[in-house]
């Protein structure tokens, strides 16, 4: 069993809740007593759920929400610290945890369906990373974001990967070097989140946004999401060359033909997701 598919021992209560509403899968982090920190079990459950959703044609978008007051406080530091008693001081476990968490984050990016974070409270360290990893994010006006690892001698190196791909370098470095909380409105200005909504409405707002995207052709959304992340890592010339190829192939798809004809004929398109 690989690190990507291995599941941690089953906890006494579900650390991740899942429901589906009108084609939208809602994954809810469910460790409120631990501020929804990313334990070994929660990382494994999130990764497994994303894997299940990948091939579920009935699911057209995903919302990641959380129980309790905090969205996610990052890695479970108590769980990590307990492994310092291992023979190697915890090195093997630490490496496995970071590898598994990174694989889970990448699975969100690689999922051919949009993933939207619904942030009701603070999202720090790997919790901030999770928000930055999602394709879109809706946050409560009471939400706040930080990468405070520097305050405890543990620089937020893996959160840095997602954070630096969402906001400007100077802003990312300020968050990483100071560890200070960034209020929701400032996070929106920085580009970390898309929308700020009244407290208590973030889940419904994220669901409404997900449903708006879900009404599009799933085939087109899949093509677009994959192309977006691939071209972002290329230089300008290579990005245009790649995007031109994608557009050409996309033009040959049934849904592109249907969508263009519907636009010309002034009618609603009928998607076949192909």
Image (cartoon, rainbow, N blue to C red):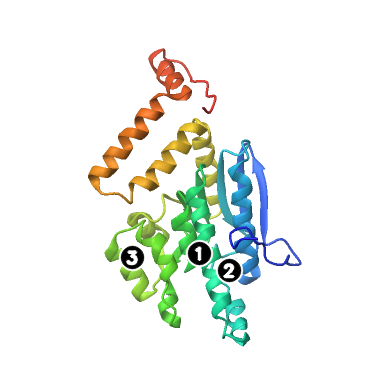
Q: Residue at x 46, y 16 (%)?
A: 267
The residue pinned by badge 1 equals 127
Are the residues tagged 3 and 2 within 8 Å (C-beta)? no
Q: Position of residue 92 (x, y in %)?
A: 56, 77
**Disc 1 secondary structure class:** helix
The residue pinned by badge 3 equals 172
In the rendered view, does 201 fall on the left or right side of 185?
A: right
Which residue is at the front of the view, 267 or 3? 3
Crowd rating for badge 2 (residues with CA inside 10 Å; few <14, some 14–19, many 20+): many
Q: Position of residue 81 (x, y in %)?
A: 58, 82
Looking at the picture, does residue 15 appear above or below residue 264? below
Q: Residue at x 72, y 67 (%)?
A: 9
Are the residues tagged 1 and 2 within 8 Å (C-beta)? yes
The N terminus sits in image quarter: bottom right
**Disc 2 secondary structure class:** loop
The residue pinned by badge 2 equals 37
Q: Residue furthest top?
A: 265
Q: Which of the marked residues, 3 or 2, is nearer the chain's N terminus?
A: 2
């Amino acid at each position: 069993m690989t690190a990507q598919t291995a599941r941690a021992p089953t906890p006494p209560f579900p650390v991740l809740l899942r429901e589906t509403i009108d084609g939208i899968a809602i994954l809810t982090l469910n460790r409120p007593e631990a501020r929804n920190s990313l334990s070994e079990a929660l990382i494994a459950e999130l990764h497994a759920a994303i894997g299940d959703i990948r091939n579920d044609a009935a699911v057209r978008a995903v919302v990641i929400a959380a129980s309790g007051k905090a969205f996610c406080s990052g890695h479970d530091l108590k769980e990590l610290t307990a492994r310092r008693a291992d023979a190697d001081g915890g090195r093997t476990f630490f490496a496995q945890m970071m590898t598994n968490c990174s694989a889970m984050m990448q699975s969100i990016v690689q999922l051919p369906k949009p993933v939207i974070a619904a942030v009701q409270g603070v999202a720090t360290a790997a919790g901030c990373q999770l928000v930055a990893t999602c394709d879109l994010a809706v946050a409560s006006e009471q939400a706040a974001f930080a990468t405070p690892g520097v305050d405890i001698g543990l620089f937020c190196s893996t959160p840095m990967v997602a954070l630096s791909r969402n906001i400007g370098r100077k802003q990312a470095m300020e968050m990483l070097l100071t560890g200070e909380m960034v209020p929701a409105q400032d996070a929106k200005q920085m580009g970390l989140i898309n929308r700020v909504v009244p407290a208590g409405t973030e889940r419904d707002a994220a669901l409404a946004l997900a449903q708006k995207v879900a009404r599009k052709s799933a085939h087109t959304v899949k093509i677009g999401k994959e192309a977006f992340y691939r071209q972002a890592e290329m230089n300008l010339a290579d990005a245009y060359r790649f995007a031109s190829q994608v557009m050409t192939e996309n033009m040959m798809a049934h849904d592109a033909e249907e969508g263009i004809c519907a636009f010309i004929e002034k009618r609603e398109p009928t998607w076949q997701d192909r």
